């Protein structure tokens, strides 16, 4: 007569360790990726509208309107791209458990983002003073809407980053904030990657 196998033995025989493994992507990372897909479609729609106006206009930019500050915006572009580097260093510090370096790189990244928005805002004020108003036509409207939309995203990214920085500062010893830093970094990289495309399309 065959010997009966205990139920515990059956569980051990049929147990698949794959069921105990972590998911391929975390819920937080999946949520951020879905958000970025929506953001990409949003920017894609506005860029499409801008190209329609630009390609159908007999003159672009229209005569009689002030020209965009290319030199200043070039320098400001370098500021935003530098913030992508400091964010990468912050992620590496988070993965290595170097809290002091992490706080320093996060703070510097937020400062660079705030500087980028401040320079953009000051240039918009100057353009308004020289006659480039939102109601000046399609050229001005698409400029302020498209570039302003990106600036709004940078502001949101800076606020998110400040929240993550505060969470890192207030974290207890041994408390892991790496996930929060990495999620914020994904969004920050997206904001930095979109800007060179907008700069090339709008300013040239």
Image: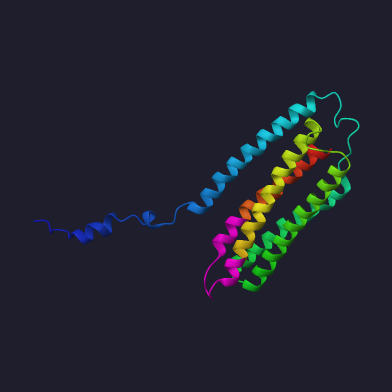
Residue 118, percent across and down? 78, 54
Q: Nearer the viewer, residue 83 or 155?
A: 155
Count the numbered circles shown.
Answer: 0
Determine the main secondary structure of the stretch shown in magenta: helix
Picture quarter with the N terminus? bottom left
Q: Residue at x 88, y 48 (%)?
A: 71
- Asked whether residue 181 is drawn in magenta, I would say yes
State left or right for residue 6 relative to residue 171: left
Residue 197, percent across and down? 74, 41
Residue 39, percent across and down? 62, 42
- Asked whether residue 172 is drawn in magenta, I would say yes
Establish if 142 lies above or below 153. Answer: above
Picture quarter with the C terminus? top right
Q: Which of 82 and 66 is in front in this view?
A: 66
Give the residues in magenta: 166-184
The quadrant in which residue 84 appears is bottom right
Q: Residue at x 58, y 56 (%)?
A: 183
The quadrant in which residue 110 appears is bottom right
Which color scheme does this rendered protein use? Answer: rainbow
Q: Residue at x 68, y 48 (%)?
A: 152
Furthest residue toward left: 1
Furthest residue toward right: 64
Q: Which residue is drawn at 69% across and 35% down?
A: 46
Establish if 185 lies above or below 127. Answer: below
Residue 141, percent across and down? 76, 35
């Amino acid at each position: 007569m065959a010997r009966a196998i205990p139920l515990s033995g059956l569980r051990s025989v049929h147990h698949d360790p794959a069921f105990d493994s972590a998911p391929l992507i975390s819920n937080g990372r999946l949520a951020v990726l879905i958000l970025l897909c929506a953001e990409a479609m949003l920017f894609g729609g506005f860029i499409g509208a801008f190209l329609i106006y630009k390609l159908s206009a007999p003159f672009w930019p229209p005569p009689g309107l002030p020209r965009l500050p290319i030199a200043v915006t070039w320098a400001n572009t370098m500021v935003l791209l530098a913030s992508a580097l400091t964010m990468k260093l912050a992620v590496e510090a988070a993965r290595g458990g170097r809290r002091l370096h992490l706080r320093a790189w996060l703070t510097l990244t937020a400062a660079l983002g705030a500087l980028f928005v401040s320079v953009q805002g000051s240039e918009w004020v100057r353009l308004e003073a020289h006659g480039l108003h939102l109601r000046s036509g399609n050229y001005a409207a698409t400029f302020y809407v498209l570039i302003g939309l990106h600036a709004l995203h940078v502001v949101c990214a800076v606020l998110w980053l400040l929240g993550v920085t505060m969470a890192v500062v207030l974290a207890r010893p041994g408390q892991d904030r790496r996930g929060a830093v990495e999620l914020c970094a994904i969004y920050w990289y997206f904001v930095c990657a979109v800007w060179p495309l907008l700069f090339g399309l709008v300013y040239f």
